[in-house]
Amino acid sequence: MQVIGIGTDIIEIDRIAWVIDNTPRFAKRVFTPVEIDYCKARKDCYPHFAARFAAKEAVGKAIGRSLSWQDVEIINGSQGKPEVRLSGLAQRLTEGCLVMITMSHSKYYATATALLMACDE
């Protein structure tokens, strides 16, 4: 497989928390219902929202263009590993490619890196 693109992003968790708490439509505009349910099921939802926000940004950077927030969904696979589910334009732009993602957070920051790989035929 050949690397086509890489993207990374970092965000302050408090910044995401403030926006979610003070902008009622933000979460529904940026995150899918699956992402919202996952994050809200956690004791402290904000690091999880922030990591997913960073992951969506990282995927856009790896692809090389801005995407609809809803076209990039971060889910957890059967082993708990984060995976990217694409739809719409994001899916069309990455046809025949694999998008891999990693996310992490600390007390103050969340970060994510995405790798876009061309699949061998």
Image (tube, grey):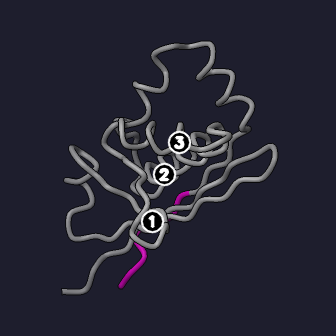
Q: Main secondary structure of the magenta part?
A: strand
Instruction: Please say if 86 is above or below 24.
Output: below
Spatial separation of the CA atoms under disc 1 and disc 3: 32 Å
Q: Nearer the viewer, residue 43 or 53?
A: 43
The kind of residue tagged 1 is Gly
Q: Nearer the viewer, residue 66 or 85?
A: 85
Instruction: Please say if 69 is above or below 6.
Output: above
**What's the residue at 45%, 16% (across, down)?**
25
Q: Which residue is mark 3?
A: 41
Label 1, secondary structure: give it.
strand
Which range is magenta? 1-7
Location of the C terminus (image quadrant) = bottom left
Q: Is residue 4 magenta?
A: yes
Q: Which residue is mark 1?
A: 5
Spatial separation of the CA atoms under disc 2 and disc 1: 8 Å
The kind of residue tagged 3 is Ala
**What's the residue at 27%, 60% (across, down)?**
94
Spatial separation of the CA atoms under disc 2 and disc 3: 28 Å
**What's the residue at 36%, 37% (across, down)?**
32
Instruction: Please say if 100 is above or below 33.
Output: below
Q: Is residue 6 magenta?
A: yes
**What's the residue at 53%, 46% (across, down)?**
52
Q: Is residue 86 left or right of residue 15?
A: left
Where residue 115 appears, as percent x and y from the top left, is: 47, 67
Q: In the rendered structure, which disc, 2 or 1, sits on the residue that comes first in sequence? A: 1
Q: Nearer the viewer, mark 2 or mark 3?
A: 3
Q: Which residue is mark 2?
A: 61
